[in-house]
Image: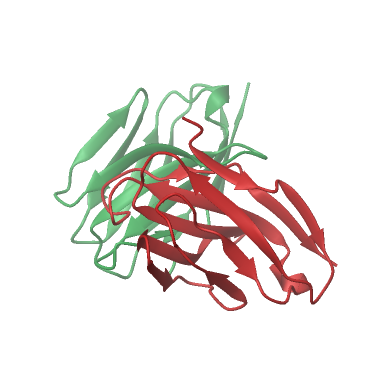
Chain colours: A red, B green
Amino acid sequence: NAGVTQTPKFQVLKTGQSMTLQCAQDMNHEYMSWYRQDPGMGLRLIHYSVGAGITDQGEVPNGYNVSRSTTEDFPLRLLSAAPSQTSVYFCASSYSRTAMNTEAFFGQGTRLTVV
Amino acid sequence: QQPVQSPQAVILREGEDAVINCSSSKALYSVHWYRQKHGEAPVFLMILLKGGEQKGHDKISASFNEKKQQSSLYLTASQLSYSGTYFCGTADVTGKLIFGQGTTLQVKP
């Protein structure tokens, strides 16, 4: 099993460009989520999904879109990148439909810089 | 709303003990603890469910007081490998996992 795979690992964007961060898991996990990590701010939840076809907003959803057409994939889209979106992005998944009672497995992260 | 962790940073000598606290203003169903090394992804340590249980993992243990919406992580006889940033994550009735701002732990020889 590969676990949670994120691509790309590094990305530089110009302000206003769009892109999609990919996240895939091969553990048949129901719950998937996206976090951004900024110095001193910890991990902040952007969007999450409790199963295919179901997504919801987290703490900092503005500027990001998600979809969940399959159990395995949970891409994060930046529609018009801004310097404030410079961050490290982590995708995580859990076995159950909620994150309440099972551990979260994290991908290795995507370091995004918007210039 | 993010849970609040304290302290923000701790510096220890090998063999010393540390306590990291996590509190929330919301009713909690579970508390998670993770450790992140520099440049790496967070790694799961333990999860505590409603019921006030205490869990242990080698010399690292944790408690969860659901009435006070608080959890504490106890690191005893710290080792160099314990260095990193520790995050508590809380899950409420919505089921989503929200993390605190992290506590940086540095263990010196």
Residue B24: x and y, percent?
A: 34, 64
Q: Is residue A110 above or below residue A17?
A: above
* A21, above or below B43, in the image: below
State which quadrant residue B34 falls in. Answer: top left
Residue in view at x 75 percent, y 74 percent: A82
In the rendered image, the quadrant that contains the C terminus of chain A is bottom right
Q: Can the viewer see residue B13 in this picture?
A: yes
Q: Residue furthest front?
A: A69
For image coordinates 17% across by 48% down, the residue present is B52
- Relative to B33, B67 lies left or right: left
Q: Is residue A85 left or right of residue B42?
A: right
Residue A114 x %, y %: 80, 66
Q: Nearer the viewer, residue A35 or B53?
A: A35
**B56 left or right of A52?**
left
What percent of the width, then of the height, locates residue B30?
Answer: 26, 53
At 24% from the left and 67% from the top, the residue drawn is B93
Left or right: B46 as drawn, with respect to B102: left
* Front residue of this view, candidates B10 and A83: A83
The residue lying at 40 percent from left, 28 percent from top is B76
**Can residue A39 be seen by looking at this rendering?**
no
